[in-house]
Amino acid sequence: MKPDMFRQPVSILVGLGFPAQVRSVMDAYRHLVEWPASVRDAAHSVALKACVAALRGEIEAETARGLFAAFADKHDLLAPETSTIAASRLQRDRDPHVR
C-alpha cells in the first residue's frame, strides 16, 4: 500500500449529493484545494496543512485522514453509511408511521 493511502476511505457527498470515496491524502488534498475560497475556515486550513504535512512525510496519513474527516463532518459532507440507509428504509417499510 502506498504511504499516502488511507486504511479506510472517507465517504463524502460531492456535486448534487453523489457519494465519492476519498482514499488517499492526495485525494483529500485535491478536494480541499478545490473548496471555494469564500467558505474556507479554520477546519479547512487545519485539514489542508495536515495533508501537505502527510504528503511530505512529516505526519502519518491516518492523522491527515482524521482531520479531513473532521472537516467533512463540520461541513455536512460525510456520506451516510449504506447500512444506515438500508436500516432506516427497512424500518420505514415495516412501520407505516415512520417517515
Image (spheres, rainbow, N blue to C red):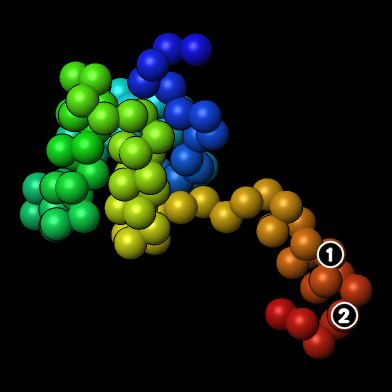
Residue 8 position by quadrant: top right
Mark 2 crowdedness (10 Å alpha carbons): few <14, some 14-19, many ≥20? few
Determine whether the residue tagged by mark 1 lies in a helix, strand or loop. Answer: helix
**Residue at figure coordinates x 9%, y 48% from the top left:** 37
Instruction: Return the mark for residue 70.
Output: none
Instruction: Return the mark for residue 95.
Output: 2
Give above or below for 24 relative to 45: above
Mark 1 crowdedness (10 Å alpha carbons): few <14, some 14-19, many ≥20? few
Q: Which of these two is toward me, 53 or 82?
A: 53
Question: Which is nearer the N-term, disc 2 or disc 1?
Answer: 1
Give above or below for 27 relative to 10: above
Q: Which of these two is toward me, 80 or 92?
A: 80
Residue 17 can be seen, yes or no: no
Name, please, the residue furthest toward the bottom: 97
Q: Amino acid at mark 2?
A: Asp
Q: Quadrant of the C terminus?
A: bottom right
C-alpha distance separating marks 2 and 1: 9 Å
Q: Which of these two is toward me, 54 or 21?
A: 54
Q: Which residue is mark 1?
A: 90
In the image, residue 91 lies at what x, y percent?
83, 71
Left or right side of 9 for 43: left
Left or right side of 90 for 67: left
In the image, residue 93 lies at what x, y percent?
86, 70
Residue 34 position by quadrant: top left
Left or right side of 42 for 18: right
**Residue at figure coordinates x 24%, y 20% from the top left:** 57
**Residue at figure coordinates x 76%, y 56% from the top left:** 86
Left or right side of 61 for 10: right
Q: Which of these two is toward me, 35 or 29?
A: 29
Determine whether the residue tagged by mark 2 lies in a helix, strand or loop. Answer: loop
Q: Amino acid at mark 1?
A: Leu
